[in-house]
Amino acid sequence: MLNTHKLKRIAITTSALVALCATQRIAHAETVSITGDIQGETCILKDLSDQGEIRSKNFTLPLGTFDLTVPSATAAAGSLFGTSKQLNFVIVNQDGSFCTSQNGASGWDISIAPAKSGYITTINGATFLSNMVSLADGGTNAVVKLTGIGEGPNNAITLTETGSYVMGNSFKTTLNSSISLSAQFAFPVANQKPNSGVYSSMLILAVTYR
């Protein structure tokens, strides 16, 4: 754990020494602050469908293209349509082997949050990710439901601006097991087909050891 008190003392001591030496030569002494961060070795987040270089990166989850003649015009708001798509994540070491220990933690999860505020839609108590492409720019008003799939029960993710666990607050996944993030289109309003257009939204994600 980072010893912040020690770092503060180092910064103050360094500043005092520079000021003391400098007063012998110039009228106005300047100060130097030294800061830093110490972290333990971390695992790398990997998408199981990616056969390339093993490294954390940007991930893409394409939902595909759907004809507006397919969804029913009499569906309830929040009803799902189209095909569910998934990203399947694991955490690995630099050599590609599964992580089995991380600073004493026995499990892990992924925290997600919309990259921009104001893009969470609530329908009948459930949350959906709204389109970050506006209608004026050719976007659809369809929303997307996100679900966590792993060792435990499927988790209908309740999105918040500050971040939500993919597998939920009460469950953690063992380090050598996968976590899947599922996404599927949903109707934004009842008894009305969504507008045609593109959908594109971004999530910020972070691995959490629990």
Image (cartoon, grey):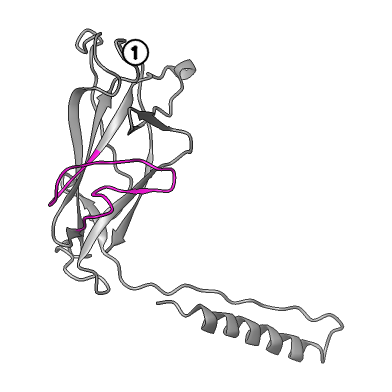
- Residue 179: x and y, percent? 19, 50
Q: Amino acid at mark 1?
A: Ser
Magenta stretch: dominant secondary structure: loop
Q: Say if 132 sits above or below 93 in the image.
A: above
Query: Which residue is depicted at the point 29% across and 43% down?
Result: 59
Q: Quadrant of the N terminus?
A: bottom left
Along the line of sight, which residue is nearer the eye, 54 or 206? 206
Query: Which residue is depicted at the point 48% across and 38% down?
Result: 117
Q: Say if 72 sits above or below 124 in the image.
A: above
The 10 Å Cα crowd at callout 1, few under 14, some 14 to 19, many 20 or more, is: some
Query: Which residue is depicted at the point 33% across and 32% down?
Result: 125
Residue 110 colored in magenta in the image: no
| Residues rendered magenta in the picture | 147-172
Residue at mark 1 = 196
Along the line of sight, which residue is nearer the eye, 132 or 193? 193
Residue 158 colored in magenta in the image: yes
- Residue 158: x and y, percent? 32, 41
Q: Quadrant of the C terminus?
A: bottom left
- Residue 103: x and y, percent? 27, 73
Tell which residue pokes out farthest to the front in this image. Answer: 124
Q: Is residue 205 left or right of residue 82?
A: right
Query: Which residue is depicted at the point 44% across and 43% down?
Result: 161
Splitting the image into 4 quarters, where does residue 142 fall?
Answer: top left
Q: Say if 169 sits above or below 36 in the image.
A: above
